[in-house]
Image: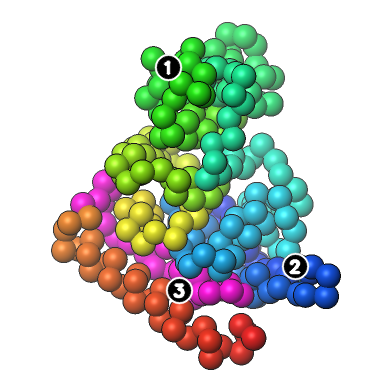
Amino acid sequence: MGAVSGAKLVADGVWRTFTTGSVETHAIAETSLAVFEGEFLSLLGPSGCGKTTLLNLFAGFDKPSGGRVLLDRREITGPGPDRGVVFQEHALFPWLTVRENVGAGKRVKAESRAGQKEIVDRQLELVGLSAFASYYPRQLSGGMKQRVSIARALANAPEVLLMDEPFAALDAITRLQLQDELVRIWKQTRMTILFVTHNIEEAVVLSDRIAVMSPRPGRIREVIAIDLPKPRDPNSPEFNAVERHVREVLWQGIDAAPNDPATL
């Protein structure tokens, strides 16, 4: 694939295998993907299809067995402050307050005291937690903890936000609320977001495009553009039509997997 005009992130013919003893596991088959500046793209697929592996390659936590991952046409060789990561578990420091957690990043700490306060205040307001700045993680709900995680990632002014099933452990109502919050934050910041999920409705609610992955070894089966205004109504006929199409593509990939030589 190489350089793609307007692309912020590029996976260029990447593949990844893991070896444990004498057993070799093919996590990702050779695949390519471009994530464009300012777009919200979701990686959707069944458990174990390589979604998180691909996200970790973009984060620089792992390296491909072959191919390249690029940020602004530069090869990614490790983690960096230009990429913020939000995990399924909030990973907050329990001994720090909400304010201190949000301000814990290197880029924030490099600012003057007044600059740090301005950055943290802005992010707390963005995620609706200004009134909880002095609280500790143990005093927060699961949804509030994830909002702190998002604020902490954004406080370091990353160019890209990488999110690995950040709402998967939450109850259904909180999950819907945070989906709405994330859409609002994305509309305000227009940040490039790569979001991993196995929830079809969530992907359709959030995404400009959905990259549907096949079962392991994962590959991009189809990239589906969603031309619906945000926020989206999951009960609308237009939403349901898109959701049906995504579901069909996903299940076609699952049905085809046992007969696919690449999975053997």
Query: Residue lying farthest right?
Result: 21
Q: Position of residue 155 (x, y in %)?
A: 55, 27
Q: How many other residues sit within 10 Å of disc 1, few (<14), some (14-19) or many (≥20)?
A: some
Would you name the residue on which mark 3 appears?
A: 222
Picture quarter with the C terminus: bottom right
* Amino acid, disc 3: Glu
* Amino acid, disc 2: Phe
Of the residues tagged 1 and 3, which is closer to the observer? Answer: 1
What's drawn in magenta, residue-wise?
Answer: 210-233
Can residue 92 be seen in the rendering of this structure? yes
Relative to 239, is 102 above or below? above
Task: Tell me the element at label 1.
Answer: helix
Relative to 137, is 75 above or below? below
Picture quarter with the N terminus: bottom right
Q: Position of residue 35 (x, y in %)?
A: 52, 57
Would you name the residue on which mark 1 appears?
A: 132
Can residue 183 be seen in the rendering of this structure? no
**Mark 1 or mark 2: whose residue is earlier in sequence:** 2
Task: Tell me the element at label 3.
Answer: strand
Task: Tell me the element at label 2.
Answer: strand
Gap in Å between the C-alphas at discs 1 and 2?
Answer: 43 Å
